[in-house]
Image (cartoon, coloured by chain):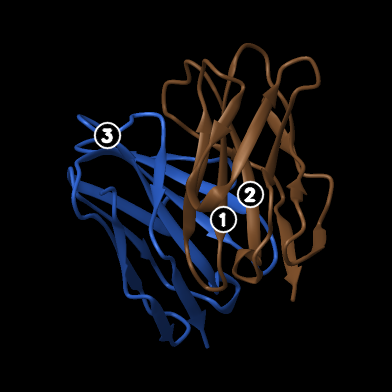
Chain colours: A blue, B brown
Amino acid sequence: GAVVSQHPSRVICKSGTSVKIECRSLDFQATTMFWYRQFPKQSLMLMATSNEGSKATYEQGVEKDKFLINHASLTLSTLTVTSAHPEDSSFYICSAGASGGLSTDTQYFGPGTRLTVL
Amino acid sequence: AQSVAQPEDQVNVAEGNPLTVKCTYSVSGNPYLFWYVQYPNRGLQFLLKYITGDNLVKGSYGFEAEFNKSQTSFHLKKPSALVSDSALYFCAVRWRPGSARQLTFGSGTQLTVLP
């Protein structure tokens, strides 16, 4: 159990376009989802925390108008990178905090999305 | 503020030998501690966690970790390393009873198991 999927796994886009990344909890309900960014050979940097049905909480230095997060249901959160630029190229990873029968202490991570902006 | 340190960027060990990946933390109060593993171009896989109880925690793939409160450490161990254990390992901490379940990650340790 506790599987989190991300789509797409890899995306290449032109500068100035917007890209949407989906994060789904496949077999459990996630009241809270997290979005991270990871640069090569570096640790994960938390971008924002999203709770189902409410606005996301962004970490300091993360532009909320550039990285739009929508947590529309207990199994789906989306991250939209608006007007992407080459410096937005990175590995984006989501995670979901379980509720109900699963441990509420553990985050379960998606496989990540590699974004390359040309 | 809570923080976690992984003092070694790289750990090399021969296959069949025991391995240790170090982690120390700084947090006020009692922490929740986690280990995750990441394979190239993949997300993080949960290995094990310490919440309360027995200081020795057993997790996936034969890994275990020992919570040492006096040394504020949570080192990851395995008695006999496999080449397939080669990956990037992250220690993470969450101060309880944190409201948002946010994790603070260490910088990661690249483990290479040599055949």
Which amino acid lies under the numbered mark 3 shown in the image of this protein? Leu
Residue at 57% across / 79% down in the picture? A86
Residues behind callouts 1 and 3 on a single chain: no
The numbered disc on residue B90 is 2
Q: Is residue B9 above or below residue B71?
A: below
Mark 1 neighbour density, 10 Å: few (under 14) some (14–19) many (20 or more): many
Q: Could you give the CA–CA distance between mark 1 and mark 2, rounded to whole angstroms?
A: 6 Å
Q: Which residue is mark 1?
A: B37
Mark 1–mark 2 contact, CB under 8 Å? yes
Name the secondary structure under disc 1.
Answer: strand
Foreground: B44 or B104?
B44
Which amino acid lies under the numbered mark 1 shown in the image of this protein? Val
Foreground: B94 or A68?
B94
Give the mark nearest the N terminus, 1 or 2: 1
Q: How many marks?
A: 3
Foreground: A94 or B92?
B92
Q: Is residue B111 above or below residue A56?
A: below
Q: Position of residue B104 (x, y in %)?
A: 60, 37
The numbered disc on residue A102 is 3
Q: Is residue B53 above or below residue A15?
A: above
Q: Is residue B1 visible?
A: no
Q: Residue furthest top?
A: B29
Which amino acid lies under the numbered mark 2 shown in the image of this protein? Phe
Q: Position of residue B29 (x, y in %)?
A: 63, 11
Q: Is residue A51 left or right of residue B30?
A: left
Q: Is residue B23 left or right of residue A97?
A: right
Residue at 40% across / 81% down in the picture? A11
Q: Chain of mark 3?
A: A
